[in-house]
Image (cartoon, helix red, strand yellow):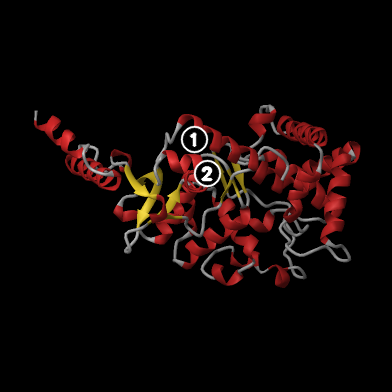
């Protein structure tokens, strides 16, 4: 009876007061809920103009997927709230749900239907530090979608500046240690690695003339769940220029992209380069091709361009300049090389989807 009376009074309120009253009731219930430590226990409707995007989101949704998201929200409504953090001015910064936020803000018919509000949940208070928010965003994004590598690298550098160790970054972002190192290397900021065992590896220009040759009797430093790990100075791909950020001598960016595409289109030539990689880069292959969490055919494709043409992995985006049939043929050639290496090393052959990462489907 009391509940019916309260509901009757609430229904007499105008829109804004009605929404605020509903939020207050839900918040009160949340405070006594056995699930009050779970953000999803309290979904709150907030005016769109009180919600703003963060400045570090590395998630990138391709136009077709963005259009599908719009259609989904138009047809099915909001089935997931936007994850946010409240600020001191009473607004909310998006931690996850940037594109759901965009649809509600930018699509007139959706904005009208939801009456200028969006559903949000707030992250736990112990996650309010910016480093924790950035890590939370990446954790949400890595479970789905693609990422802009440069933005991911920027976030890793920001966490380093906030005194996060490589181990902490790996744990909180769901990355392998060597992935953290690769993202750090992309920035070229060697000064951030003064406290690292492998700090010298990022000072490329100083190392290029006195790089220590790989010793034939070098042993892997660790074997874990079938994964063979080598330290960076044992990777043949490193002195070959795989991570080099500047252009090869005498070549422009357009030249590199053209050479990249020409080689991937010439399958016999591409296969010969792949054969060189799996036969000549023993330790690099052990380090990368035993890593089940990465796109191994992508690495092989990039490595073949490096070993044959001296072009670094920075130009991996050239793969997207190929037609879809050309991409399929190149992927298959790389998969054949991967399976040849796996067989030679007493490992099980893989299907295409098993050889690719969950978020990257091609050679870039």
**Left or right: 218 as drawn, with respect to 60:** right
- Disc 2 from disc 1: Cα separation: 10 Å
**Would residue 142 be found to the left or right of residue 230 on screen?**
left
The x, y position of residue 115, in whole percent, is 39, 43
The one nearer the camera, 328 or 273, is: 328
Q: Is residue 308 left or right of residue 190?
A: right
Circle 2: element type: loop
**Is residue 173 at all visible to an observer of this figure?**
no
Q: Which residue in the structure is indicated by mark 2?
A: 107
Q: Where does the image place residue 183, in percent across and percent down from the top left?
A: 60, 56
Q: On the image, which quarter does residue 326 sit in?
A: top right
| Residue with the mark numbered 1 | 73
Residue 16 placement (x, y as % from top left)? 29, 47
Q: Which of the two discs, 2 and 1, labels the residue nearer the N terminus?
A: 1
Q: Residues within 10 Å of mark 1 (few under 14, many from 20)?
A: some
**Looking at the image, residue 169 lies above or below residue 296:** below
Q: Residue at x 46, y 43 (%)?
A: 111
Is 273 on the left-hand or right-hand side of 281? right
- Quadrant, the C terminus: top right
Identified at 57% across, 41% down, the residue is: 145
Q: Quadrant of residue 26?
A: top left
Q: Neighbour class for label 2 at 10 Å: few (<14), some, many (≥20)?
A: few
| Mark 2 vs mark 1: in front | 2
Whether tag 2 and tag 1 are in contact, CB under 8 A, the answer is yes
- In this view, the residue farthest toward the left is 1
From this viewpoint, is residue 3 visible?
A: yes
Look at 52% across and 32% down and name the residue there: 72
Quarter in which the N terminus is drawn: top left
Give coordinates of residue 64: x percent, y percent.
64, 38
């Amino acid at each position: 009876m009391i509940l019916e009376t309260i509901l009757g009074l609430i229904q007499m309120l105008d829109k804004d007061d009605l929404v605020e009253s509903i939020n207050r009731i839900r918040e009160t219930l949340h405070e006594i809920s056995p699930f009050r430590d779970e953000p999803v226990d309290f979904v709150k409707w907030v005016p769109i103009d009180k919600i703003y995007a963060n400045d570090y989101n590395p998630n990138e949704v391709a136009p077709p997927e963005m259009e599908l998201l719009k259609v989904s929200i138009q047809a099915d409504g909001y089935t997931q709230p936007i994850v946010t953090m409240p600020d001191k001015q009473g607004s909310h910064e998006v931690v996850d749900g940037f594109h759901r936020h965009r649809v509600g803000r930018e699509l007139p018919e959706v904005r009208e239907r939801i009456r200028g509000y969006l559903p949000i949940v707030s992250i736990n208070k112990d996650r309010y530090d910016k480093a924790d928010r950035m890590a939370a965003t990446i954790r949400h994004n890595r479970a789905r979608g693609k990422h802009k590598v440069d933005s991911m690298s920027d976030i890793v550098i920001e966490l380093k500046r906030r005194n996060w160790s490589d181990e902490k970054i790996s744990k909180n972002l769901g990355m392998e240690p060597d992935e953290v190192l690769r993202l750090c290397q992309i920035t070229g900021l060697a000064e951030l690695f003064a406290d690292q065992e492998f700090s010298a590896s990022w000072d490329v220009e100083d190392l290029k003339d006195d790089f220590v040759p790989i010793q034939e009797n070098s042993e892997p430093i660790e074997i874990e769940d079938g994964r063979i790990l080598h330290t960076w100075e044992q990777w043949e791909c490193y002195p070959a220029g795989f991570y080099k950020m500047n252009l090869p001598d005498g070549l422009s960016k357009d030249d590199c992209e053209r050479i990249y595409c020409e080689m991937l289109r010439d399958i016999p030539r591409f296969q010969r380069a792949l054969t060189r990689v799996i036969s000549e880069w023993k330790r690099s292959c052990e380090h990368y091709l035993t890593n089940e969490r990465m796109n191994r055919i992508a690495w092989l494709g990039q490595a073949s361009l490096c070993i044959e043409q001296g072009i670094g992995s920075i130009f991996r985006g050239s793969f997207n300049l190929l037609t879809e049939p050309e991409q399929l043929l190149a992927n298959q050639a790389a998969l054949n090389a991967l399976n040849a290496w796996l067989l030679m090393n007493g490992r099980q052959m893989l299907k295409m989807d098993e050889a690719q990462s969950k978020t990257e489907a091609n050679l870039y």
